[in-house]
Image: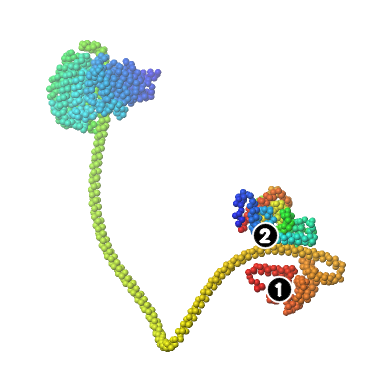
Amino acid sequence: MAQQANIGELLSMLDSSFLLILEEITTVFKDNLNSDRGPMLVNSLVDYYLETSSQQALHILSTLQEPHDKHLLDKLNEYMGKAATRLPTLSLLGHVIRRQPSWKHKLSQAPILLSLLKCLKTDTDVVVLTTGVLVLITMLPMIPQSGKQYLHDFFSIFGRLSSWCLKNPGHVAEIYLVHLHASVYALFHRLYGMYPCNFVSFLRSHYSMKENLETFEEVVKPMMEHVRIHPELVTGSKDHELDPRRWKRLETHDVVIECAKISLDPKEASYEDSYYYSVSQPNSRCLQPRQTDPSASPYMDIQSSHGTSTSTPYFASHLSLSQMQRQLPQILSPQSMRLSTEPQQVTIWSPSAICGMSTPPTSPGIVSSESSQTSSQPYSKYFSTPGGKGNPLGTPATSPPPVCISDDFVHVSLPPAAAPPPKKEDKPDPGRPSLSRQQNVINSEKALEVPGNKSSVTLSDLPEFLGYLASDEDSVEKDKEEDAISKEISEITTADAEPVVPRGGFDSPFYRTSESLPASQRKSHSVASSVQGHSLSSELLTSSLDKHGPEGAGDTTKQSFTPIDRPWGASEESPADIREGQSSTDTSILTPSPCKVSAQRRVVFGSGPSPSYEHLFEVALPKTAYLFVSEKTEELLKKAKGNQDEDCTSSTSPMEVLDRLIQQGADAHTKELNKLSLPSKSADWTHFGGSPPSDEIHTLRNQLLLLHNQLLYECFKRQQHALRNRRLLRKVIKATALEEHNAAMKDQLKLQEKDIQSLKLSLQKEQARYHQFQEQHDNIVAQLHSQIRQLQHDREEFYNQSQELQTKLKDCRNMIADLRLELKKANNKVCHTELLLSQVSQKLSNSESVQQQMEFLNRQLLVLGEVNELYLEQLQHKHADTTKEVEMMQSAFRKELEKTKFYIQQQSQRLDASQKRIVELESQLSRKDHLLLEQKKYLEDVKIQARGQLQAVESRYKAQKRITQTFELEILDLYGRLEDSLLKKLEDEKTEAAEAAEERPDCSNEGFADSVAGYSDEAMGRNGETKPVSAQDGGSKDGSSSSKLSTPEKSQNQRGRQFSSLWDAPMSLEPSTNVPLSVGSLPSSKSFLGMKVRELFRNKSESQCDEEGLTINSLSDTLKTELCKDPNMEAKAPPSPDHLSPSPKNQESSVGQLHIMDYNETHHDYS
Amino acid sequence: MAEDSQRNFRSVYYEKVGFRGVEEKKSLEFLLKDDRLDIEKLCTFSQRFPLPSMYRILVWKVLLGIIPPHHESHALVMKYRKEQYRDVYHALQVIRFIKDTTPQIEVFLRMHQLESGTLPRNVSFPLELEDVVFLAIAKAMEEMVEDNTDCYWLVSSFVNQLNNKYKDLLPQLPKFLEQYLNFEDNRLLAHLRACSAFSKLPYTLWFKKCFAGCLPESSLQRVWDKVISGSCKILVFVALEILLTFKMKIMALTNAEKITRFLENIPQDNTDAIVSKAIDLWHKHCGTPVHLV
């Protein structure tokens, strides 16, 4: 709440008159807005504005930033719903929109748009409608693509309003309709420019209906005459023109210019695409695109003359004039051409000089003259036709209208403002001429005079214009011509002075509102005005001329603005005069305002953007651009001057100022009206039969409001144009920069070309040198080649020589070889001959010996021949006997031969037989061999078998032997025991007897026993027992036996005995070794017996040798020889096998074995 | 071998499956059919295979040279052998060394003594070691052979073979035993050595008597087959197998005398297995004797 209160205080302080406070508060508000996001502050601001329409509040609101837009729009929407606050809301919206806030794209989504549309569709208040339409028109280019959803709303609004214009259902004042009409016209342009296809189709559908036909005829058709056919109608489609891509690259001002392009209305249209007009109206494009408009204006005028609507043509024309004040001189120039030729010069030089554009006018003079004629006609028409229609306008607005009109004129139409200065030379009142037109409108009879006036006005315009231009561009020329021009002008003006004055009287009704009594008012007014005008004009003129004179040749930039300062100075005076005049007269309407305005203006101008703007141009722009700008500023200046001079209520400065001025002027006016001389006014009004004052005031206010809106709209348009201009300027700058760049590039190119040339030159030089070197090189090469050739030639010669020499060498070698061969041959021959020689010598010797032989043989031959002869002789003697003998012998030989042959045959047969026999025998032999082998095998087998058996037998025998041994042992044992017992009994006596008794009866037994005893002795010996008795016995037996051996015939017993003794011999020999003589004492060796004994001994010794190895070698050696001599004896020696000692038997068996083994061998013993 | 081709083709499989001795009889018959018996082949056969009992005596006689290889002379030779036996017997009777009541083995001993010429002067002459060995072998042989003559001859020849052919080899057998025992079970050997029982093992019983009296005759026959056919090393393996078989008991015994006593009286129940194992072991260590062609 505190904040609320605070805000209230702040709001109240917002409109403070102190600048410092103002600034502080605005900054406070802005800070608040920046910090606070709530809707409260904005709402209160809006409320405050709607209450007080405070400028500061407006300013703050229109510069609202992003987050607050919604609150603002919501608040506005809220107020829009209420009919009471609708109008101020709309105007606020218009203000805000015209600022082009950064959030403008949100407008299409905002509910306020809808409510605006709804309002436009439904509202019946003209002022609201007009304002709304203007707002809408302003808004449209900002939301081109998003606005399409409301397209039909737009169209329907257009339809409604256009029909409204005609039918005027609300029966509002006509003057409102004019405003409405204008805004509808603007809407028409906008819609047609932005959405041509849709719009045309809408028009087609909407106006094909009968009820709308009239509207079309009356309202829409004239509008259509002011537009060209849109290119989009050809190339585009309904959908395409709604395509967002189309709008994406277009900014707001682009859209505005797009719309202006298709307009043919000079006030609306923009001709950036200059060639359109250069083709259609080349002459019109004299100074710059904008300047071409004048040529267009005639058309518009024509149209307007055709137009049935009363005031629209006016407004249109005025608007166009106000915008294109520059064109006036142009328009008028043709007319002035009749008087002077200078304007032509102006037209000629201007386009090329200023713009440097691509399309210079073709034969401008002729065309311009034509156009001037055409333009003059329209004017006449224009002035004639509106006259009739003008009445309605005049009638309702009895006295106040002039004020309005003048206002209109002041800030809308600049031509009057532009026109006055020249007029001032001869005319006291510069503002009047324009008013005179209105006067003309009122008074149709004066229409005829208007052209004249016009022309005079234009003429009066010219010199000044020319002066400016001349000072700008051709100051020298201008200086020259200036005098002449001034002269001419002066002549003209003086010539026109007379007619003008009365017109000036006409102009005076400018103030007055009554038409019924123009004369009286005119007169009274004219006096004042004339006084005023004179004073003003003289001052202005002098000042301007003075300025142009000295300064024109000098600094052009200064010049353009200096005049402005002066006029201000002058204007300061003039308002005062006017005020005085006004105060003196009844109509002091304008007097107060000029003061304020001038004051304000000074402020604005002092701190205004123009100087800085200008300065920027000066710095930034190239010359062409500067020229362009300077001209513009001049226009502005003139406009300002005109405005100021004429009306003093408006200014040509930035729109805000103007807007504010008008508003405040209006306020002041109303105040004054209210304060001052209400009775007089009322008296006046009542006097003029006007409507009740309150109504009137309301109407006037509304009108003012409308005008204000219109002005704001135009301002907006102007802003867009300015933006456009800036862009174009940038382009121009770019172009010039590029040109300069091009020039620089060209220079570089030239330099490079030069370089190239120099390089080419050096190249040529190098080439030449190269050629030289090449030639030298070629020469050297050629020389070398020739040398080489020569050398080669020499080489070939040498080669040939060497070859020749080689061939010679070869020949020589061949010869040598041949010679050698020959030598060899010769040697061979020599050898051969030597050989031959030796042979020959041998042969010779041979032949000699042969000869000797020959001789010998010859001799023999001779001898033989003689002998032969002798034998022949003998033969001849003995021939008969020999033949018989021979025959006999032959037969004998034959027989003998046969015999032998037979014998041979026999022998061969025998041989065969024997051979057969041999074969047979051989086979038999082999068979026998085989058999023998088998036999051998068999024998072998048998042998083995026998051996096995033998072994068994042998073992048996051994066993037997053992048995016997055992037995013997037993027996001996028994004997031993027996003898022991006997010895004990018989002692010595019976020993011999017993011995003898035993020996005789059992001799064989004894022998056997003897041998056994011997053996047992032996065994016993082994056993360690010795029997000396038996040994003694043996010894005794030996002696006896030796004696018995002498007889060859021996009995079996004897033999046994012998053998047993033999057995005993070894044993006996043992002791006998001591007496070897005993052997030797044996019978002599020569006797048979001795031999036998020896033999026996040998046998025994042999066996003994085997067993005992005793040394009887001497004896055996002697005996061996004898034994060999008589083997048969030995063989027969062993008679009984049973009692043979084992060793002989063994020997025998071994011999047998040998025999068996040596089966194949022949036995020496047996053979 | 000609007879090999006539052998049963299944013989290979018999051997593979583990039936041994199925075909041996046939092949032995083939061998015995030869007129001149091939002693070497018979040796190889009896080393490789156990002899069938019906041919054992014959083969032994042939191998020990009691009868010659020729069939023709068998009858004659046997007649001689019998006569010799009778003669010797008679002689012993005459000298009153034996009587009718004298046990057969003593008769065999006396006969052998007589034949070898070592007959003592008196019957009461104390028996020497050789005689004890002979008696043991004869006793075993008497169980195997019915005929006295054959028995005498076999015993006599067997003893002669031991005394002649294996005279050098027999003393080395304990060494072999130690070697193989070390190879087979050195722990047992270590135990025996630790008990100092190894030198006191019943070597006489094992190697001189050839296990006669130690093993039952049915087992002994198979051992003697190998001994007679020329390999006394089998004795080592039998001893080794006995040791291995009774290893646990031996290990339990720590006294050398106890061990010896136990080994001299080993249980007779599974001697067949011991012999079989011993033969396998023998084959393993000394290699299977190959047929000598």
Query: Looking at the image, how many numbered discs can be counted on the residues?
Result: 2
**Chain of the residue under the numbered disc 1 shown in the image:** A
Looking at the rendered structure, the secondary structure element under dot 2 is: loop
Residue for point 75% across, 76% down:
A1048
Q: In the image, is residue A584 above or below residue B288?
A: above
Looking at the rendered structure, the secondary structure element under dot 1 is: helix
Kindly identify which residue carries mark 2: B71
The image position of residue A729, as x and y in percent, is: 25, 31
Residue B227: quarter of image: bottom right
Kindly identify which residue carries mark 1: A1130
The image position of residue A373, as x and y in percent, is: 15, 25
Mark 2 and mark 1 in contact? Answer it, CB < 8 Å.
no
Q: Nearer the viewer, residue A699 or A1?
A: A699
- In front: mark 2 or mark 1? 2
Q: Nearer the viewer, residue A1029 or A570?
A: A1029
On the rendered image, what quadrant is the N terminus of chain A found in? top left
Q: In the image, is residue B172 above or below residue A40?
A: below
Are labels 2 and 1 assigned to the same chain? no
Q: Is residue A157 left or right of residue B237?
A: left
Q: Amino acid at mark 2?
A: His
The image position of residue A108, as x and y in percent, is: 33, 23
Residue B181: tell me if it is visible.
Answer: no
Q: Residues within 10 Å of mark 1 (few under 14, many from 20)?
A: some
Q: Residues within 10 Å of mark 2 (few under 14, many from 20)?
A: some
**Chain of the residue under the numbered disc 2 shown in the image:** B
Q: Nearer the viewer, residue A755 or B151?
A: B151
On the rendered image, what quadrant is the C terminus of chain A found in? bottom right
Residue A367: quarter of image: top left
Residue for point 31% across, 22% down:
A150
